[in-house]
Amino acid sequence: MEIAPSIIAGDFSRLEDEIRSVEDSGIGILHLDVMDGHFVPNFTFGILIVEAIRRMTSLELDTHLMMSNPSLYLERFYEAGADILTVHIETGLEAFRSLEIARERGKRIGLAVNPPVHPKVLLPHLEDIHQVIVMTVNPGFAGQKMIEDALYKVEFLRRERDKRGLSFRISVDGGVKREHLPMLRDMGVDVAVMGSGFFGLSRDERRALARIAS
Ligand code: DX5
Ligand code: ZN
């Protein structure tokens, strides 16, 4: 299992330092949470910052679009250097349009599913995606408590993936702390997103995390 630190829980006045500490921890993925103040009740950052982070690092930029109209901006986020973009299934047609754009452009795309939503809504799209993000908080803020009840989706998705011989990644996002890592790994989660659970730790503790997860 890999860890993907979510930069919104980092110190933005020392952004480059925070990114180096992710690299120094032997981690390969950086999670970028884009919020539009409409799909979720919070703002974070957009294309400009993704582009700036791209210039700072070669980490995989796993960019999570918590936006009502992602299809409008999808191409610009890819151009800014996002390696994979994940849109929310709850945006309906907007999500379907986004999948189409990514397919036409040969880009990697994922679908995220909020805690109250059943994962069966993802079934018609699994062939077209590279990742599912199972949300274990209602998105909008770092530092919330994990909703463990949403974790049944991991097993549901793994079965479906095996049955159909697919290879999309299963990611869990929201409230993940160090003590959850062995459980998530044993469930077969591929990527554990960690915001405050990563950036709230000292440099040495951050380095130790990658070992716990593997
Ligand atoms: C939820 C975001 C997450 C989250 C991560 O709104 O998509 O990526 O903030 O932060 P923690 O791990 O602190 O919940
Ligand atoms: Zn996220």
Image (cartoon, helix red, strand yellow):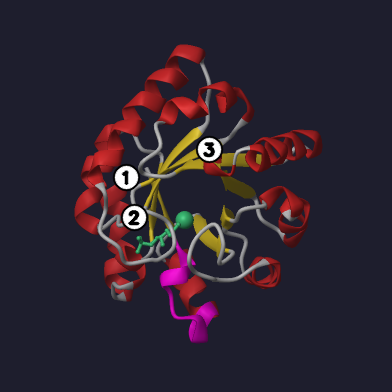
Q: What is the secondary structure assignment of the residue under circle 2?
A: helix
Q: Position of residue 42 (x, y in %)?
A: 49, 69
Q: Could you say whether the residue bearing mark 1 is in a helix, strand or loop?
A: loop
Q: Estimate the x, y position of residue 141 in percent, counting from the top left.
A: 40, 66
The three-letter code of the residue at mark 1 reads Ser
- Residue 12 against residue 105 in the figure, above or below: below
Indicate the amino acid at tag 2: Ala
Label 1 close to label 2 by CB (< 8 Å)? yes
Residue pictured at 33% horizontal, 74% vertical: 203
- The 10 Å Cα crowd at callout 3, few under 14, some 14 to 19, many 20 or more, is many
Amino acid type at mark 3: Gln
- Give the residue number, with chain letter if any, for mark 1: 214
Q: CA distance from mark 1 to mark 2?
A: 6 Å
Q: Which residues are magenta?
A: 6-15
Task: Give the residue pinned by disc 2.
Answer: 210
Give left or right: position of 66 versus 93: left
Q: Within the magenta stretch, is there residue 122?
A: no
Comparing labels 3 and 1, the label whose residue is closer to the camera = 3
The image quadrant that residue 39 belongs to is bottom right
